[in-house]
């Protein structure tokens, strides 16, 4: 396998055949990384060759291709961090802890997203990893960030975040979760009402109020969305 990088263009050849090529990668500089899709791997011989200066042998540069080349980080060792990790991609691979770290970095950079979907996803990741202390602190921060409510989700998201952890009623945030879920289900004409109704059912389930659970599952169970219906059936 040959990996050739010149002037913002790259090409990978396997047994003499080009398999991948492109221009203007991001980040524009850094380390060469080799990995195996699954299982162990051994490399027999590695060679690093500095490209010659013969311009005629070089692939078209990013500038000639009409693309804007990526800037080079001032510290080469930081090049690997130039592009933030994709937390959703990590979560899809079931790398819960790594995904949580990526979302923590995202929210530190963009704190305004704490009360939005990013905040909810981080709470779910804390629940998946069993990190009760982090989950509790994060839920409290979500409720604080959602004190000024304008939309049903402002109450529903922190309530769902709280209910995601088993034995969540021990966290001392129960009253806030009930209040948030109640706010989310005030407008029964909202298009997202069935989902907020499911959140209300989740909160009541954590409280051990089974009669209320059945009441709030009524609309999700009659909905045509298979994902919503499946989630409601799980509560039964």
Image: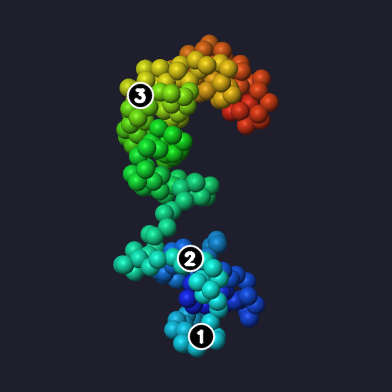
59 and 37: which one is in front? 59
Image quarter where the C terminus lies is top right
Q: Residues within 10 Å of mark 2 (few under 14, many from 20)?
A: few
Instruction: Please report the residue visible at 61 percent of the width from the left and 18 percent of the height from the top.
Output: 219
* Mark 3–mark 1 CB contact (< 8 Å): no
Using the numbered discs, state the Cα–Cα distance from disc 3 to disc 2 in whole angstroms.
Answer: 43 Å
Residue 166 at what x, y percent from top left?
A: 43, 28
Secondary element at tag 1: helix
Q: Earlier in the sequence, mark 3 or mark 1?
A: 1
* Mark 3–mark 2 CB contact (< 8 Å): no
Secondary element at tag 2: loop
Residue 115 visible within the image: yes
113 and 123: which one is in front? 113
Q: Which residue is the site of mark 3? A: 147
Q: Which residue is the site of mark 2? A: 68
Residue 231 at what x, y percent from top left?
A: 58, 28
Q: Which mark is residue 210?
A: none
Q: Earlier in the sequence, mark 2 or mark 1?
A: 1
Left or right of 216: which side holds 69? Answer: left
Q: Which mark is residue 55?
A: 1
Q: Nearer the viewer, mark 3 or mark 2?
A: 2
Using the numbered discs, state the Cα–Cα distance from disc 2 to disc 1 in whole angstroms.
Answer: 20 Å
Q: Residues within 10 Å of mark 3 (few under 14, many from 20)?
A: few
Instruction: Please report the residue visible at 61 percent of the width from the left and 22 percent of the height from the top.
Output: 220
Residue 236 visible within the image: no
Q: Residue furthest right?
A: 224
């Amino acid at each position: 396998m040959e990996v050739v990088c010149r002037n913002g263009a790259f090409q990978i050849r396997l047994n003499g055949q080009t398999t991948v090529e492109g221009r203007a990668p991001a980040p524009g500089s850094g380390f060469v990384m080799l990995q195996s899709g699954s299982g162990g791997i051994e490399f027999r011989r590695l060679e690093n060759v500095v490209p010659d200066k013969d311009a005629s042998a070089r692939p078209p540069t990013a500038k000639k291709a009409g693309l804007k080349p990526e800037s080079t980080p001032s510290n080469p060792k930081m090049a690997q961090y130039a592009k933030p990790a994709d937390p959703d991609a990590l979560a899809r691979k079931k790398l819960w802890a790594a995904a949580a770290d990526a979302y923590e970095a995202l929210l530190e950079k963009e704190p305004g997203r704490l009360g939005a979907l990013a905040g909810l996803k981080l709470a779910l990741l804390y629940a998946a990893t069993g990190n009760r202390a982090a989950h509790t602190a994060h839920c409290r921060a979500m409720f604080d960030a959602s004190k000024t409510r304008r939309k049903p989700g402002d109450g529903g998201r922190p309530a769902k975040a709280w209910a995601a952890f088993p034995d969540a009623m021990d966290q001392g945030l129960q009253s806030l979760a009930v209040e948030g879920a109640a706010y989310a289900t005030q407008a029964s004409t909202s298009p997202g009402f069935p989902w907020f109704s499911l959140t209300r059912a989740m909160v009541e389930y954590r409280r051990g109020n089974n009669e209320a659970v059945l009441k709030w599952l009524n609309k999700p169970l009659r909905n045509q969305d298979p994902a919503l219906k499946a989630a409601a059936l799980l509560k039964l």
